[in-house]
Image (cartoon, coloured by chain):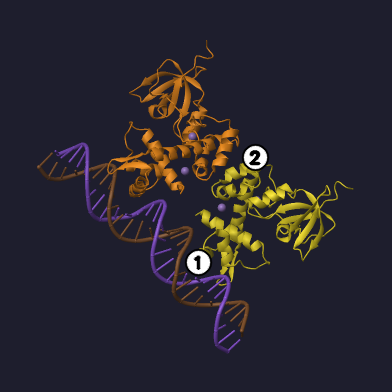
Chain colours: A orange, B yellow, C brown, D purple
Amino acid sequence: MLPSSTVENYLKAIYLGTSQRPDGDRLPMGHLAAALGVVPGTATTMVKALAESGLVDYEPYNGVRLSAAGLTLAALVLRRHRLIELFLVRVMGLGWDEVHDEAEHLEHVMSDRLIARMDEMLGFPQVDPHGDPIPNAAGEFPAHESTTLMTCDTGTPVTVTRITDQEAGFLRFVQQYGLMPGHELEVVARDEAADAVSLSGPDGQRLTIGTRAASKVRVSASQASSRA
Amino acid sequence: MLPSSTVENYLKAIYLGTSQRPDGDRLPMGHLAAALGVVPGTATTMVKALAESGLVDYEPYNGVRLSAAGLTLAALVLRRHRLIELFLVRVMGLGWDEVHDEAEHLEHVMSDRLIARMDEMLGFPQVDPHGDPIPNAAGEFPAHESTTLMTCDTGTPVTVTRITDQEAGFLRFVQQYGLMPGHELEVVARDEAADAVSLSGPDGQRLTIGTRAASKVRVSASQASSRA
DNA sequence: ATTTTGGTTTTGACTAACCAAAATTTAATG
DNA sequence: CATTAAATTTTGGTTAGTCAAAACCAAAAT
Ligand SMILES: [Mn+2]
Ligand SMILES: [Mn+2]
Ligand SMILES: [Mn+2]
Ligand SMILES: [Mn+2]
């Protein structure tokens, strides 16, 4: 039988949780529970059930990670989520800061037909409004490598590829200062002590943000396109 | 707290069930249960809970009908359902025979914002693809009076306003023979014994259908528009 | 090597929604 | 009026998902 929305939410949270920690590392129950807004005991019980059905690899007191089957399912949920977000922005004209919550619900009820139609209408896009990659219909993730404003080279132009925090307030901040995907900028300096990163936009505009925020902005080396 | 999708489905089924039976009459539990695909005992238990929260008026062994509060909620679900159907047909290009099932799920998870946006994109429509009237955002039904092919005058032109059966096979039949909302036709004769109704389209084409089918096609007197 | 501590697992209990089958009521039939 | 039939309600039991709080484990700190 097909997975409930609860199961889908768990798998997605496990994927997102494990992806932002040292490779191969399992996600602790506490983190998973917090991400899902349930108490730890609930997460433990649920994860044991998921392990029983072969969707996750669970080691008591150590954490959980997705099995191959679980990863495919998570990818398909993420695919739906991200296509929906893009559809809401591009076709329905919603703001990129308000589509995440809508997609959180819609992702569980859209039929394959509908998702395929949206994909088609959008021209088979590779990324969603936040730059998050869209898995294909087979549940495979596209290759994607990039660094953050914390780790990229300083003094060389980079292009924003992705914002890894869906919180509306942060997204509005990003939009206001022109740090959205596609925009070009440069890291001028990083100040360990001040916990800050200084940036300059293509128009020479200066901006200093905290390291917490900086690590949520992913970038890649700009193509030597315009300035030959 | 906001109603679960189960509650929304019950209210909608009670509305639709009572609407197609003698006025003021309550809907028997058996009918409700059948419409929802549950056993009668389940419907009884649920309806008692709904009565407890003031959404329905329930009389044991006699049936159930909506309270004013329940009617408003049902109308809002119907509004979402019908706007979604129209959106799927007009914006996403799905067939009118495949949108009902999609809407059945989507109606429970679309936010007011999204519904309002769809309403706007569609130009604040009055009816859905099947001619079913769309309640307003306050949960009020628009006035609508019409008869069916079983009860309308014979020998005078009528316009199809509504198809009151969402079943895909029937909708395709209707489409194939040009009986969709907006089309003009005329009842030539009704044959009690043969259980049949003869129609002629505007192009003079003849067609005979059963009374069961005929009563699912609602019509109203054609405006004396074209042929002055 | 103990003790503390923070995270994890268990236990017991709850709610929403459902079914199967027994008990009951109403309505129809003889 | 008594009997049967049909529909409805009750009763007892299930599953998914959750929380509160007690019990437990493992790693760190004394
Ligand atoms: Mn979700
Ligand atoms: Mn996104
Ligand atoms: Mn529904
Ligand atoms: Mn409809």
Residue B142: x and y in percent read: 70, 54
Can you tell which mark lies on residue A150?
none
Tell me the amino acid under the disc marked 1.
Answer: Gly
Query: The residue tagged with tag 1: helix, strand or loop?
Result: helix
Depicted A110 relative to depicted A210: above or below: below
Q: Nearer the viewer, residue D22 or B78?
A: B78
Tell me the amino acid under the disc marked 2.
Answer: Gly
Residue B112 visible to the viewer: yes
Residue A192 left/right relative to A137:
left
Question: Which residue, as the protein is rendered here, is positioned at the far front?
Answer: B194
Residue B137 left/right relative to A79:
right
Residue B134 visible to the viewer: no
For disc 1, the neighbor class at 10 Å (few under 14, some 14 to 19, many from 20) is few
Q: Nearer the viewer, residue B25 or A155?
A: B25
Which chain hosts label 1? Answer: B
For disc 2, the neighbor class at 10 Å (few under 14, some 14 to 19, many from 20) is few
**Marks 1/2: CA–CA distance:** 41 Å
Residue A17: x and y in percent read: 38, 37
Residue B141 left/right relative to A2:
right
Depicted B163 relative to depicted A223: above or below: below
Residue A177: x and y in percent read: 50, 26
Of marks 1 and 2, which one's residue comes earlier in the chain? Answer: 1
At 54% from the left and 38% from the top, the residue drawn is A84
Check if mark 1 and mark 2 are on a common chain. Answer: yes
At 83% from the left and 51% from the top, the residue drawn is B223
At 60% from the left and 63% from the top, the residue drawn is B67
> Which residue has dot 2 on it?
B93
> Which residue has dot 1 on it?
B41
Which chain hosts label 2? Answer: B
Residue B96: x and y in percent read: 66, 46
